[in-house]
Image (cartoon, coloured by chain):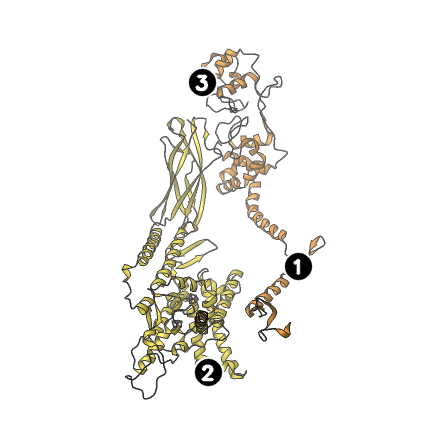
Chain colours: A orange, B yellow
């Protein structure tokens, strides 16, 4: 082909179309070649320094000894080092002391969020807002007391309240009248409240007793919130009728706070106590 | 017959094309341009404009109070500009600043062409300084061309090495000066010498050194031709009314060499004597007599050159001058500035941007408050019958000292801030977060959400500082 090239001496490749369209073999610009070879060198150097070649199960390690895992662990260590300072302090302190130290309580609120999310939020909600059957942690109505020690004890030991099912002891009319009095926030206005023995647990004034874990019936805050389509009156009646954790009553309400002493370390429980206290209801 | 005619006219079209392409000088940098340096009016203007870049070198050394007057402190995410501290929260002002300068470029280009390129661009100025050094060390363009071609000799090596060393020195200084805007300048010098300035600082300096050295020392006009986007952007902003360095072809053509003994009266040629001085001085190697073209950075040096020639041969100056295409071609007087829509629109946007920046600076509150209402739960009923809401306050303190602030809230009647201790230390240059609980007796709430205004107040240098923010108080559905 070279013999009858109609455009001699212009370094075309000999590929010619339509009489005069031809492909030239001009070299790429120098800067382009420099960049090209520089990137090749870069690639080789990178391959020597860093993990790169897949060989068998593991890639070549590179002479820098760098690995992503190490970098991650280093980062983690840095965080741990910052935390360690607080953590050692927390170890030697009671929950109450932690609460009193502003820096520490702030640290605890920030860091115990994960603990709360893992262990508590499933029942009590992410912000302590409670749920059907599970108490609100953000209010100041506590069955077992809202002092930091009480909260810590509740988490450590767990709680299980008892209320006898009154379905067989009271008539429907009596239950109705009691429930309405409670809903009005004035249980003592119903004579049944004293006569039928409610006062034994809920107190003469109906405000409950912390030692027994009995509910305050006067403040409009209810241990059992109504489920979908139910009224608060219905839930009150249900609780009176079937009781709470009454083994003789199959339809009784189940209300058990499990003990966390076996599952969490004492420090974690302290932190959680502070965290719950700080929801806004601690006393 | 007609067939023959059309072939002929076709031929003439093609001839025109060839004639045009002959003028097409594709400057791909094969040959270093050694431009002649001449004095003149525009040359002086150019030096003056270049001088404004001194700020770049000495700016970081100015102090304001106990710190650098202008410091872009990236690790701490704050900009210090004289007395003001600008945090990421105020970055809208940066956008306005950029808008202002973008339009300044647009308006300058629309009126007078690539003023930026010719007089203020760092590429132009650094190249100018580099070639000035070259001229002083190696001699005039002729000599330099000869030196480039000359075989290696001791004198050639000395001349070249000195030049490159000075170029490198300027490049390193450029790099350090750049970094100094982001790094306390005195610390920087100390750290640089103690080899502890950190890889980012060294890396940036190295990049700038290499960039300056290569771009101003070797690439020069190639940057303007092939790399710089602004060259092309400004190119399209120019229109017929834009005043740009132009060759007056009516006056100049037909060009012809000056002939000895010929009197002015019997001259048949135009004013251009074809001395090619305008090409010789052009830093981008352009022949302005072919009209405006992409390579021209509008530095006006050819005007100086031509004026000098005209002066010598006693013809009026201004054969090459700042003139609009319209004025040259149609002999039309350009419209006064205030009659051009472009001027009005650009100025309006620019004043808006300026106004915004000025407003921003006066309204830069030293204390800023953000309020985040807790969502889980939205509200809680308390045993005394009140409704409690939880808020996280984020207090931003832009001052250089910590400030003790008191939190207040105003909202529905009967509102109580629950916390015993409503005094917080707002840490300097940081956002301090704190939680507050607000209670309102249920009967006082007339709607599901009620507005509530939080404020923080603190004292600094006997001056009351305050920040406030509106939020909502949420109660049960009614
Ligand atoms: S073309 Fe670009 S680099 Fe060249 S002078 Fe203009 S702005 Fe500067
Ligand atoms: S043609 Fe004239 S104005 Fe344009 S770059 Fe060259 S010397 Fe400067």
Mark 3: which secondary structure?
A: loop
Q: Which mark is residue B446?
A: none
Residue B306 percent location from the top left of the image: 35, 77
On screen, residue A263 above or below B327: above
Q: Which residue is mark 2?
A: B143
**Which residue is at 53% across, 65% downward?**
B195
In this view, the mark in front (1 or 3): 1
**Of the residues under marks 1 and 3, which one precedes in the sequence?**
1
Same-chain status of marks 2 and 1: no
* Badge 3 density bin: few <14, some 14–19, many ≥20, Cα 10 Å: some
Mark 3 sits on what residue? A186
Depth check: B107 or B152 in front? B107
The chain letter under disc 1 is: A
Q: Name the residue: 50% across, 78% down.
A: B160
Q: CA distance from mark 2 to mark 3?
A: 110 Å
Q: Residue at x 61, y 73 (%)?
A: A5
CB at mark 2 closer than 8 A to ligand 2?
Answer: no
Indicate which label's residue lies in the foreground, 2 or 3: 2
Measuring from the top left, give residue A185's x and y in whole percent: 45, 20
Helix, strand or loop under label 2 = helix
Number of numbered markers:
3
Where does the image place residue B38, in percent across and percent down from the top left?
A: 37, 78
Mark 2–mark 1 Cα distance, whole angstroms, equals 53 Å
Q: Image quadrant of residue B373? A: top left
Tag of residue A62: 1
């Amino acid at each position: 082909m070279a013999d009858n090239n109609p455009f001699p001496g212009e370094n075309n490749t000999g590929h010619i179309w339509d009489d005069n369209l031809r492909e030239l073999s001009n070299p790429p610009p120098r800067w382009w070649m420099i960049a090209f070879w520089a990137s090749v060198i870069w690639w080789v150097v990178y391959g020597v320094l860093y993990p790169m070649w897949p060989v068998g199960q593991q890639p070549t390690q590179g002479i820098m000894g760098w690995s992503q895992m190490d970098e991650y662990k280093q980062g983690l260590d840095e965080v741990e080092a910052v935390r360690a300072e607080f953590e050692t302090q927390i170890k030697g302190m009671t929950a109450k002391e932690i609460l009193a130290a502003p820096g520490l309580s702030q640290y605890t609120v920030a860091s115990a969020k994960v603990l709360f999310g893992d262990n508590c939020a499933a029942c009590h909600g992410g912000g302590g807002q409670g749920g059907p059957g599970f108490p609100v942690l953000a209010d100041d109505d506590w069955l077992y007391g809202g002092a930091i020690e009480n909260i810590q004890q509740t988490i450590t030991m767990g709680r299980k309240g008892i209320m006898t099912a009154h379905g067989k002891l009271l008539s429907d009319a009596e239950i109705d009248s009691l429930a309405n009095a409670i809903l009005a926030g004035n249980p003592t206005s119903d004579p049944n409240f004293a006569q039928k023995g409610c006062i034994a647990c809920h107190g003469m004034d109906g405000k409950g007793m912390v030692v027994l874990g009995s509910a305050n019936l006067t403040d409009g805050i209810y241990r059992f919130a109504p489920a979908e389509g139910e009224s608060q009156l219905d839930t009150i009646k249900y609780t009176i009728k079937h009781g709470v954790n009454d083994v003789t009553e199959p339809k009784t309400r189940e209300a058990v706070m499990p003990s966390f002493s076996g599952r969490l370390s004492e420090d974690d429980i302290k932190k959680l106590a502070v965290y719950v206290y700080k929801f806004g209801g601690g006393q | 017959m007609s067939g023959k005619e059309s072939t002929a006219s076709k031929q003439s079209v093609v001839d025109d094309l060839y004639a045009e392409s002959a003028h097409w000088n594709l400057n791909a940098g094969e040959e270093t341009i050694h431009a002649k340096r001449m004095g003149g009016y525009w040359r002086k203007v150019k030096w003056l404009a270049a001088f404004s870049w001194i700020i770049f070198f000495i700016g970081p050394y100015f102090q304001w109070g106990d710190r650098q007057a202008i410091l872009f402190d990236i690790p701490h995410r704050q900009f210090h500009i004289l007395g003001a501290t600008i945090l990421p929260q105020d970055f809208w002002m940066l956008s306005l600043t950029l808008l202002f300068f973008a339009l300044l470029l647009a308006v300058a280009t629309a009126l007078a062409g690539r003023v930026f390129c010719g007089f203020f661009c760092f590429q132009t100025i650094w190249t100018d300084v580099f070639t000035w050094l070259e001229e002083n060390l190696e001699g005039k363009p002729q000599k330099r061309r000869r030196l480039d071609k000359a075989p290696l000799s001791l004198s050639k090596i000395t001349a070249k090495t000195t030049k490159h060393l000075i170029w490198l020195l300027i490049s390193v200084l450029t790099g350090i000066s750049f970094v100094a805007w982001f790094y306390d300048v005195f610390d920087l010098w100390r750290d640089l010498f103690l080899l502890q300035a950190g890889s980012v600082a060294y890396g940036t300096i190295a990049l700038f050194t290499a960039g300056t050295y290569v771009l101003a020392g070797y690439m020069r006009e190639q940057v303007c031709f092939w790399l710089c986007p602004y060259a092309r952007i400004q190119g399209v902003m120019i229109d017929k009314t834009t005043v740009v360095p132009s060759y007056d072809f009516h006056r100049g053509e037909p060009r012809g060499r000056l002939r000895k003994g010929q009197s002015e009266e019997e001259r048949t040629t135009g004013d251009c004597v074809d001395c090619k001085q305008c090409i010789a001085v052009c830093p981008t190697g352009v022949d302005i007599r072919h009209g405006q073209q992409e390579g021209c950075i509008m530095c006006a040096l050819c005007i100086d050159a031509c004026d000098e020639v005209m002066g010598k041969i006693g013809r009026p100056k201004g054969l090459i001058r700042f003139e609009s295409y319209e004025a040259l071609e149609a002999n039309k007087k350009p419209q006064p500035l205030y009659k051009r829509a472009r001027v009005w629109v650009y100025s309006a946007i620019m004043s808006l941007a300026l106004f915004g920046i000025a407003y921003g600076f006066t309204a830069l509150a030293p204390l800023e408050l953000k309020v985040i209402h807790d969502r889980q739960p939205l509200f809680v009923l308390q045993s005394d019958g009140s409704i409690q809401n939880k808020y996280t306050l984020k207090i931003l303190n832009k001052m250089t000292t910590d400030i003790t602030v008191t939190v207040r809230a105003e909202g529905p009647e009967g509102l109580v801030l629950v916390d015993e201790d409503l005094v917080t230390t707002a840490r300097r240059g940081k956002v301090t977060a704190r939680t507050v609980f607000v209670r309102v007796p249920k009967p006082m709430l007339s709607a599901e959400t009620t507005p509530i205004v939080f404020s923080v107040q603190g004292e600094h240098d006997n001056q009351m500082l305050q920040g406030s923010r509106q939020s909502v108080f949420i109660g049960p559905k009614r």
